[in-house]
Amino acid sequence: MIAQRLVFFLLVITVLQHSAFSQDSQYPVVHKEYFHVPIFENGQIRVLNVSASKGDTTAFHRHCYPILYITLKGTMVSLKEPSSKWKEVELPSGWIGHDLYQNDSCYVHRFAISGDGNLHIVAIEALKVSKPISLSFAPTYMDEGFSVFEIDSSHLTEITKSQIPIIMIERTCSSKCKVEVISSKKLSKRVLKKHKGYAVFFQKQL
């Protein structure tokens, strides 16, 4: 009898886990959601260009990797999980933050722009643990495995010795900022005069 109850218990857990997975899998992963546009991927990081205007609402989507956000233009944003009510938060320009999502427990949500301004974010998913180069200057942001280094012209000699992806963000932009990813070997004073450059690493075990 005990053995039968144990088998039944394990069967119920298996069914519940499968049901939860099936429910999550009905939603697209974040880089396949309309407003999250992938612009670079190298096996370690995936860079998404996220832009939305007042009244825009994303589809529900899944976050399955640790992710870092660099906010270029912030505004008021409403957030919603599938089984919760909308929650309004202010996302300020210049804010950098992260969330530690995992493959076995993807997070599902959507957002809507409730403020008057446009939202523009660069999101960097950590697909694998990075092996960052040793840099002599301090990171702009460092927390829970993520390190963000802002590159300026004084770092050129050091940074161009390596071949790492640098996220380039246009310094002067109106409603949207041009974002691209280039190799550190292609950096120059001329490029950095017009763009902010960021190197992003994730060292925490996934």
Image (spheres, rainbow, N blue to C red):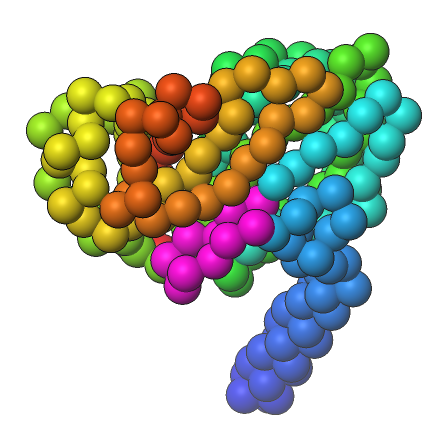
Q: Residue at x 59, y 85 (%)?
A: 7
Whole-percent x, y for residue 69 in the image:
51, 32
Q: Is residue 144 magenta?
A: no
Q: Residue at x 24, y 52 (%)?
A: 163
Whole-percent x, y for residue 166 in the image:
36, 41
Establish if 121 lies above or below 201.
Answer: above
Q: Residue at x 31, y 37 (%)?
A: 187
Question: Which quarter of the picture shows residue 175?
Answer: top right
> In the rendered view of the protein, which quadrant contains the N terminus?
bottom right
Whole-percent x, y for residue 177 in the image:
61, 26
> In the rendered view of the protein, which quadrant contains the C terminus?
bottom left
Q: Residue at x 51, y 41 (%)?
A: 180
Establish if 38 lies above or below 74.
Answer: below
In-front residue for pair 28/3: 28
Q: Which residues are magenta?
A: 39-48
Establish if 175 lies above or below 204.
Answer: above
Q: Is residue 164 left or right of residue 40?
A: left
- Our reading of the magenta stretch's main secondary structure is strand
In-front residue for pair 205/175: 175
Question: Which quarter of the picture shows residue 10?
Answer: bottom right
Whole-percent x, y for residue 99 in the image:
49, 37
